Amino acid sequence: MAIPQNQATEQSILQQADAFRAAYQGVREQVGRMVVGHTDIVDGVLTCLFTGGNALLEGVPGLGKTLLIRSLSQALSLDFSRIQFTPDLMPADITGTTIAVEQEHDDGSKSRVFQFRQGPIFAQIILADEINRATPKTQAAMLEAMQERSVTVGGTTYPMSKPFFVMATQNPIEQEGTYPLPEAQLDRFMLKLEVGYSSREDLHEILHRTTMAEQPEITPVLDAEKIVAFQKVVRQVIIAPHVQDYAIRAVLATHPDGEFATPMARQFLRFGGSPRACQALVLGGKVRALLDGRAHVSVEDLKHIMTPALRHRILTNFEGQAEGITPDLIISDIIDKLPVEASGLKV
């Protein structure tokens, strides 16, 4: 008796889920050799990695943001590049530039030809350190690479290697000499992860690892081919129409003039999330489902990923800023008040 197509697809996903979980835990374990605590941040970064998204890490200096990204690059057999953003950094310093090179021919004559020299953006894992220290003009040089996975210089488009993954850090407390990221670039980050302070127990472990003679080592456990294959597995996870509709209504609830907006969103929001927010919710939910051994996304998967997926995509109005209303508070209100199912669904 033949197995129905939907059932066969689900069985195929579940068979690959075990390999996905093993790979995920393997990378997580290697990163954990260097990074103490911050499990939610590590999970968020790995979610971006396995969905092909970009991650923005925000926190005060010294909390291990750069260490986490470096540790992840060491656990993966991928090309790594670090770009230190400064006010005098130019777009060509990131993308590369065309230079004149003298070329010698067989007959002994010489001529000059133009060659493109790739910049540090041409890697598979990019650490954009303190990205808000560069000018908007330089920040914009990252836009095409982050969204289109290509760079155009001198009228020629150069594709990026796969996988391509940008992890940026920024300091939220310093204002002098910084340039807030444009909303268009913020929207290119799948998740915004806020790195907090370590606990008392974690600080003991950090001191033990960093002030003793022994230094932990990280072993690469995944290569580019396997990561791309797992990214395809994530996209095969099934999402029911009513669950997908919940993700859509959650994003529409951030639109202050929309029909699904909560009273809090109507009062304190100026702008809401874009379609990329829906994509981030669904893909993040699929990763959660695989880690839980399921072939279907649940509403709880979407709720788990909602705050880091939406917090950088919504803007509070003047009243919200005056009242100290943060995006996280509004998202929490949406999670509490948005019904799981709604009438009028047409798919």
Image (cartoon, rainbow, N blue to C red):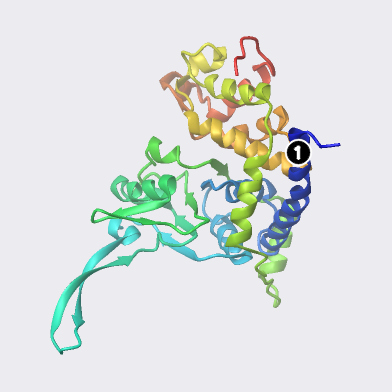
Q: Residue at x 70, y 74 (%)?
A: 212
Between 240 and 50, the one nearer to me in the picture: 240
Between 41 and 203, the one nearer to me in the picture: 41
Image quadrant where one finds the C terminus: top right
Q: Residue furthest bottom?
A: 108
Name the residue tied to disc 1.
10
Q: Residue furthest front?
A: 1
- Residue 41 visible here: no
Image quadrant where one finds the N terminus: top right
**With respect to residue 127, does 283 lie above or below?**
above
Between 39 and 119, the one nearer to me in the picture: 119
Q: Residue at x 51, y 66 (%)?
A: 79
Picture coordinates of residue 178, whole percent (x, y):
36, 47
Question: Which three-letter amino acid code belongs to the residue tagged 1?
Answer: Glu
Picture coordinates of residue 47, whole percent (x, y):
62, 46
Q: Residue furthest right?
A: 1
| Quadrant position of residue 99 | bottom left
Secondary element at image label 1: helix
Relative placement, left or right, of 10 versus 196 is: right
Picture coordinates of residue 298, whole percent (x, y):
72, 30
